[in-house]
Amino acid sequence: MNTQSIALARPTATQSAYAWGNGLLGVAIFSGSLPATKIAVMAFDPMFLTLARAAIAGLAGIGLLVILRPPRPARSDLGPLIIVALGVVLGFPLLTALALQFVTSAHAIVFIGLLPIATAVFGAIRAGERPRPLFWVFSLIGAAIVSGYAASGGTDGSLAGDLLMLAAVVVCGLGYAEGARLSRHLGGWQVISWALLLSLPATLPAALMTQPDSWLGIGWPALTALGYVSLFSMLIGFVFWYRGLALGGIAAVGQLQLLQPFLGFALAAVLLSEPVGWPLLVAAGAVVLCVAGARRFAG
């Protein structure tokens, strides 16, 4: 049975667990993106960071395509692949990198709580998914908990940073939904690899043109952060994420993104010494219940 037929049929318990396991692993990888980006923009220009991470991931994606030799996408897949590239390869990384010049990573994580709703909306528009009304109730409650918890920390915001993060959420939700729809017949790693390949003729020369004048003063923390957002956030995470969305449903598995802010808060506290209060476990537990409820009424 191929990926498309599994996605269109009602999944068995084993298939559902596999889909949610892949989605959770993808979210765990993505949770390090904002803290790593915050570290990286301390040493790199946001534009270079966006281009470099896409270029590095694109070169790695070419390696996968050359070694594994999957079938080429159909001509009808080209438009959706361009949407994926504009949404998750270029749009979200650039907008978040720009936003993190104005706000802390903890404040930016507030907006990540809106990603599940954005992904579900675009899943309904682009993939024809129709979650039941109670799904939206649990999704909205989960988003409210995430946003309320983050706001209660008193993180300083700015209008420019907030607008940039809101735009990032919109383009990312579209890229997630479009990529998941394509993954049903192309496969998860193939979708992100082809999208990165489409972007490479623009990202690689531009990254070389915007690179720092000297690399001597750039420390290992920034270089490590660049490596993480390039290989894990831009490529490896999508392999698991798109597979989970394709097999388990865009709206349902997309609710796992509600957990991402809490993982991100923990990483921000450890890596950046950003304050995280004790209500974290209480709020995270409530979000887990919302994810479970949304899963129950997703289809």
Image (cartoon, rainbow, N blue to C red):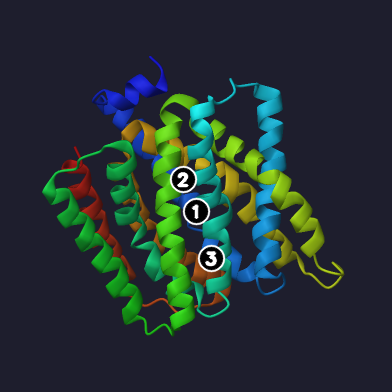
Query: Which residue is the extreme one toward the top?
Result: 1
Mark 1: few/some/many CA within 10 Å (<14, 14-19, 20+): many
Residue 227 visible from this viewpoint: no
Query: What residue does disc 3 label?
Result: 95
In this view of the protein, which residue sits in the foreground, 90 or 232?
90
Question: Mark on residue 26?
Answer: 2
Residue 206 picture location, percent across and down: 75, 57
Crowd band around label 3 with a 10 angstrom C-alpha radius: few (<14), some (14–19), many (20+): many
Q: CA distance from mark 2 to mark 3?
A: 21 Å
Q: Residue at x 19, y 43 (%)?
A: 131
Q: Residue at x 41, y 76 (%)?
A: 276
Q: Secondary structure at mark 3?
A: helix
| Secondary structure category for the residue under label 1 | helix
Residue 280 at x, y percent in the picture: 33, 70
Q: Residue 30: which numbered mark, if any? A: 1
Q: Is residue 33 left or right of residue 16?
A: right
